[in-house]
Image (cartoon, coloured by chain):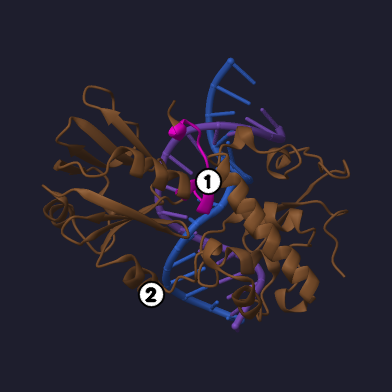
Chain colours: A brown, B purple, C blue
Amino acid sequence: MDPMSVPIMPELPDVEVYKRYLDATTLHQRIDRVRVSVPELLDGTTPQALGRVLHARRIESSRRHGKYLFAETDRGAWLVLHFGMTGFLRYFQHGERAPQHACLEVRFANGFHLAYAAPRKLGRIALARDPCWFVRSTGLGPDALAVDRASFRRLARSRRGLKSWLTHQQTIAGIGNVYSDEILFQARLDPRRRVEALGVRELDRLYRSMRRVLTRTISTQADPSRVPRSFLLPHRGMGGRCPRCRGRLRREPIAGRSAWYCPRCQRGH
DNA sequence: AGGACGCCCTGTTCGC
DNA sequence: TGCGAACAGGGCGTCC
């Protein structure tokens, strides 16, 4: 079973699944060829430089921060991958066909390949000294699953709207449009409300909802078909109905994205 | 500071 | 049925 066969929006849970996929397939094997077919995705490096850094190296470990995946080589340099909205990984045997839209392809000495594919070319490939350095220089906020309740409250001193705040990677890293809808739905909060206007109980509800949604979707491999029917996600679409009150869901552009929510269950006051 | 908007990209879905 | 417009959205830049 190839867990990468379902197209998904690469937010924190999805990237966590990619990380586990990478760990389960590519670690400790010697890289003997690197091929870049979409050089526009390279940020701050070139196909030649990337090839030099990776050639004859092994990936020894990986890390994830928000929607970014980091792979450590045995010489210390880190490969940085961001999946945009359609990116994914595929590990395949020599002779099998590479996925369409493969932008970066690494061949290992054991005859297997790892492809990073991005049909819409909205991803990013970079090199970094280490993940901390990269996170700092990009200005990313703490990973959503590493934020404790106290930090969450501190970060919430913001005039932003809830939807905009949750998806702002410089505040908290890892949450995108789809999962922010789910988190707000389960916290029963109106996406248009301001963060700083929330009471302590509401803020704690939001915090618990964030953790519940992220950990739960990771535990089901971020597979959309395995998301409980009580979640908003399976109903997020034209004509969708609220799994809680059966009312019609509403779509509204908020923070430059289309937000789905239940106007009855997610009231603002 | 933060929101609105446009842009990048391309496969899919929609309406006429 | 066919075709073009609209849409999907992560991240960035610009403007207000």
1 vs 2, front mark: 2
The N terminus of chain A is located in which quarter? top left
Q: What range is drawn magenta here?
A: A3-15
For residue A269, say whether it is visible: yes
Classify residue A100 as left or right of residue A269.
left
* Residue matched to label 1: A9
How far across and how far down the image is residue A20, in percent?
41, 44
The residue type indicated by label 1 comes to Met
How far across and how far down the image is residue A10, in percent?
49, 48
Classify residue A9 as left or right of residue A109.
right
Q: Secondary structure at mark 1?
A: loop
B13 and A47: which one is in front?
A47
Say if mark 1 contacts mark 2, CB within 8 Å.
no
Q: Which mark is residue A90?
A: none
The residue type indicated by label 2 comes to Arg
Task: Tell me the residue at 46%/44% (across/down).
Answer: A17
Residue A153 sits above or below residue A264 on the image: below
For residue A87, say whether it is visible: no
Q: How many residues crowd around disc 1 within 10 Å: few (fewer than 14), some, or many (20 or more)?
A: many
Task: Tell me the residue at 32%/34% (across/down).
Answer: A91
Is A11 inside the magenta-drawn segment? yes
How far across and how far down the image is residue A186, in percent?
75, 54
The answer as to whether the residues below labels 1 and 2 share one chain is yes
* Residue matched to label 2: A136
The chain under label 1 reads: A
Residue A71 sits above or below residue A196 on the image: above
Which quarter of the picture shows residue A268? bottom right
Which quarter of the picture shows residue A181? bottom right
